[in-house]
Image: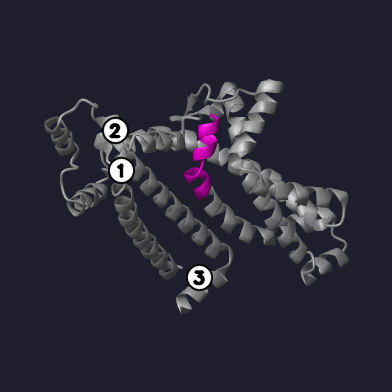
Amino acid sequence: MLVYLIRRIAQAMLVIAVMATLVFFAVYAIGNPIDVLASPQADQIELAAISQRLGLDRPLWEQFGIFVWNALRGDLGTSFVYAEPAAKLILQRLPATFELAFTALAIAVFVGIPLGVYAGLNPDSLGGRSIMGGSILGFSLPNFWQGLMLILIFAVILGWFPAGGRGQTATVLGIESALFTLDGLKHLILPAMNLALFKMALVIRLARAGTREVALQDYVRFARAKGLSRSRIVGVHILKNILIPVVTILGLELGSMIAFAVVTETVFAYPGMGKLLIDSIGRLDRPIVVAYLMMTVVIFVVINLVVDIIYAAIDPRVRLSEVKG
């Protein structure tokens, strides 16, 4: 297990180093922030002063070297627009994105797995076919369109939930979150549902496929022959064995929820990292864009590493094959 862990950590560090290089040069090669930040009446002297103050007058390779040195010390640069550390601005928005992503993941898991298991156990029933038809819609409908329809139906027509914003927050055990207030939960339900629909469809299909495969195994037939109840067979013998692929996929999907909640946060005006990213791209605020992408890469890598460790703990064959390799 130790060899497996060391190898995975080394691979994770390599991925972060490669992505840092790609992200920096890709972002810094596009556009000129001075054209956005400077006044239209600014002369060449003022433009040169702004360029020198932001460090944009140096060669690109030198800027990259400074970025790497500062990043190793935890400094991802200072925002051109807000004149504050980029990491600080992103971390201020991070709790809002986290609560949105984790709520969406919880909805996808606690709704998707039971529906997928039911569809797998009853593939030819009306309910099973309806669930699979709904999962196809979850894959097909554009995320932004789903968000607009949710706002139109549940906020405008029915008036059940607010159309946007984060709502009130409260602090519990030093953690500030909208999950701790009724108003915050009301504001969270629609964007979380919008973010969860695609993942829910994915979980349904994974759970259905796993259930249909496991239900045909000899140990399940033996459990039925012993006279075990249907609920025990499903809960102990089927559900446990379909969780390995579901856990693997959901770990990666959590990273994508955090990274790509941009559309949902924009549609619902939810003050998370995604909305900050969109505003920063429009203003060519390079440090925030780079810091966001780097933090997203780190989140992806860490989640993937944790999933690999959990996967190896669940299935010892994984770490044994890694050691042999």
| Label 3 sits on residue | 319
Side (left or right) of 1 relative to 75: right
Q: Which type of secondary structure does the marked residue at label 2 adopt? A: helix
Main secondary structure found in the magenta portion: helix
- Residue tagged 1: 31
Q: Amino acid at mark 2?
A: Val
Left or right of 211, for residue 2: left
Q: Badges 1 and 2: C-beta atoms under 8 Å apart?
A: yes
Q: Tell me which corner region of the image, top left, top right, bottom left or bottom right, holds residue 106.
A: top right
Q: Amino acid at mark 3?
A: Arg
In front of the other: 7 or 53:
53
Question: Crowdedness of circle 3 by 10 Å Cα count: few (<14), some, many (20+)?
Answer: many
Tell me where residue 254 appears, x and y as whole percent. Answer: 53, 48
Say if the magenta span includes residue 261. Answer: yes
Front position in the image: 278 or 98: 278
Which residue is under mark 2? 36
x, y percentage for residue 246? 63, 56
Q: Left or right: where does residue 252 sit relative to residue 11?
A: right
